[in-house]
Image (cartoon, grey):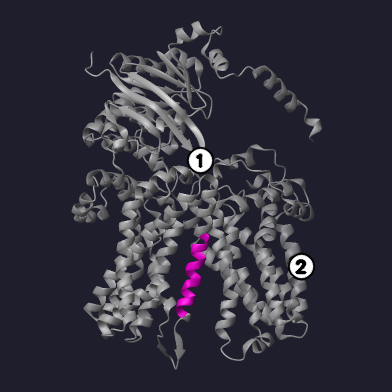
Amino acid sequence: MTRENDKVLSIQNLTMNYGGKKVLNGINLEVASGEIIGYIGPNGAGKSTTVKIMLGLIDDYQGKVVIFGQDIASGDPSYKKRIGYVPENAEAYDNLTAMEYLVFTGELYGMGRDAAQAKAERLLGQFDLQDVGHSRLSSFSKGMKQKVLIIASLLHDPDLLFWDEPLSGLDANSMMVIQEILAQLAAQGKTIFYSSHIMDLVEKISNRIVLLVKGEVVADATFEELQGMSEEGSLSGIFNQLTGFTEHRNKAKDFVSIVQGDEEYA
Amino acid sequence: MREFQSLKFLSVFKGIFTRFGVDYAVMEKILEIKLTMDERRVPTIFGENGKKKKEGNQFLKSLWIYGLYSLILIPFLLLGENYMYQLSLVFGMILFILMTSMISDFSVVLLDIRDKNIIQTKPVNKQTIAAAKIVHIMIYMTFVAGAFTTIPFLVGLFRHGIVFSLIFLIELVLTILLVVVLTSLLYLFILRFFDGEKLKDIINYVQILLSVGVVVGYQVLIRSFEFVDLNMTYAFSWWHFLIPPLWYGAPFEVLLNGNTSSHFIAFTVLAFMVPVIAIYGYAKLMPSFERNLEKLLSDTKTRKKPRNGLDEMGAKLLCRSNEERVFYRFAASMMKKEREFKLKVFPVLGMSLFFPFLFIFTYSVDGGLEEISGGNMFMFIYFCNVIIPSVVFMLKFSEGYKGSWLFRAAPIEQASSAYSGTLKAFFVKMYLPVFLFLSIIFIWIFSARILPDLAAVLLGGLLQILITYKIVNEGEFPFSTSFEFAQESGGAKMFLLTLITGAFVGAHFLANAFDYGIYVYLVVLLAAIGIGWRMVFPKTKAVAAF
């Protein structure tokens, strides 16, 4: 499948100040369709802020963000029709049933009620959730709820996905299914922006890795390229090296010795 | 999901919304979802406990109480044609009810940040989100206003005719607008200047102040009328412009009594213009409101370790076991930190500080302080005992109720020490300060002769704490239930428990009828507390109670 306009997303010199502190420090990023981008970085690096800016939740940034050829600062929300989003912390209206939540989301994206309903039912079925479709989300386990949110982000067949820690709470089998879904969606030309702290997964899923440290992009390459640049074999090793963190063994040792030395504190 | 009558009615105004750039169909969907969720405020856990599962909108079911309250408006409507006096009072009460309900029940809706992540990430424009939010609140405020004014409205219609009720209706709409929009604008203003936890604290204190302020303001309103020969006359002064209920009394005076004094005209203009200007300002400022809501999530400051010298001392002196001490400290910091708790409790504390004086000065028309100091008015200090049931009841709720698994997971030997520690902390941190403050002023007014009486009040308070706990809280851990249950399960039981204070007052008067009777009463109270405490908090391994 080929597309007329390959460039899905373009970020130019994105800066964001928060309370006198620079959260984002001049980010540049060009994303083409069909890419699966693993967006990684230590806590507080500015990953969520970037995603929130792209979704229009934060609008007092400096720089330019263009999605599907539209400068999002224009205030017209229609570009969001082609975006799917899985928020971190599995935020949802818990008092709704899974079906109600899915249909509501579909309708917000401009789908008809019946179409959203039929599609949601079938997708729930694929995850073996059809029996609990009319139970409230508040009674769901973390993994079940996560599956519902994943379905909610795909219901309207978006071209660009923002997934923030999408696999938290899922069992190993479901993870494999999701992983395969992502690969197939990308093959269809969908673009996936994926952030996670589980490095093994990012390593397997992504075909491009963007590493953010203190509001700056410090690495932007495929996993193989990153391996070539570093002596570490695994992504978590590369992650430690690029973020300048080598102390883990000593830290762990100190921690354990404090746990065991309780006679000093009793 | 079912159809909502209120949404059907709303579609009448579709044109207006569309003109403001609102996508009506989307707004309707959002509202439908919100109303559906409101109907389900009661979590499913409730059903599993074997109790009857309640469906439907709990809020709407609690509306009848407003209908009951509204009966106090009727005398003011029947009285006569002194509209300025009567209707200022009526609208004062309407504003009071709407404002309290807005602050305590709907601030959450206004400050909800889930909307941001769930709805704003979808292709929905900002006007639509803002409109959905305000309409959602308006629907409920209309229900509250409706419940509170239907009976008075009908009474007014029969007594004063059709023009009167038309003015009444228009003013009602204006007051709803005024309350909702002004509250939003106030939050907007605070959101601009603060962020994170500090912001939440400030919003919390503003809410507390507002709810106390509304009560105090209402009292001031009554006093702005002079009582002359049972005929209330209104005398204008400039500061009356600051009291909104007076604005809403004036139109009746102008239109029905033909009174065209310039200040009445000015009030009428204010009554109409302020809500209109406010809603225009709201429409302009709402985008920045939504943007600043984000600040609620972020906290940039790091805090120093606080020092709790007094709490330490209280825990050491008052608690007998280590476990009890742990819970004393825990409860003390929960009471200090938990905003929802403070929001529910501090206004009540504020009123218990305010009401004794209000009553003393209301009932002492002539004679002055001399006259008062010889009398029995110090008994009004029992107001600080009236609040005990509602506060003790609140001790079992928390925003973080889900964290209470800890109490069951931790090896707690004596579960009852959880509550005994908590009650002691409540006594020291909340009851005692109020009581001491009142006592010091009362001793200054009434001289040291009332010391034994004060002791009786204090012991009575302790006993009441114990009784309330036994009836409403026993068998649960403190801070372990969601606030969602706070509204429905109070009710009649709470009211009866408040009446217990009356029993104490009665006993106290009885004791004072005899020489040295008060000392006998003190001994009886002491014994009752001693025995009661041992019965309620027995020294056994009380695991079975749970």
Q: How would you classify the magenta stretch by its main secondary structure?
A: helix
User: Residue B369, position in %: x, y?
Assistant: 65, 86
Along the viewing direction, whichever of B459 and B365 lies nearer the viewer: B365
Q: Which mark is residue B232?
A: none
User: Residue B119, position in %: x, y?
Assistant: 34, 39
Would residue A33 appear left or right of B505 to someone viewing this image?
A: left
CB of mark 1 within 8 Å of CB of mark 2?
A: no
- Residue at left 57%, top 74%? B355
Element under disc 1: loop
Q: Which residue in the structure is indicated by mark 2?
A: B527
Query: Chain under label 1?
Result: A
Q: Considering only vertical position in the picture, is A108 above or below B329?
A: above
- Residue at left 79%, top 55%? B317
Element under disc 2: helix
Q: What distance separates the C-alpha of mark 1 from that of mark 2?
A: 59 Å
Residue type marked 2: Ala
Residues drawn in magenta: B208-222
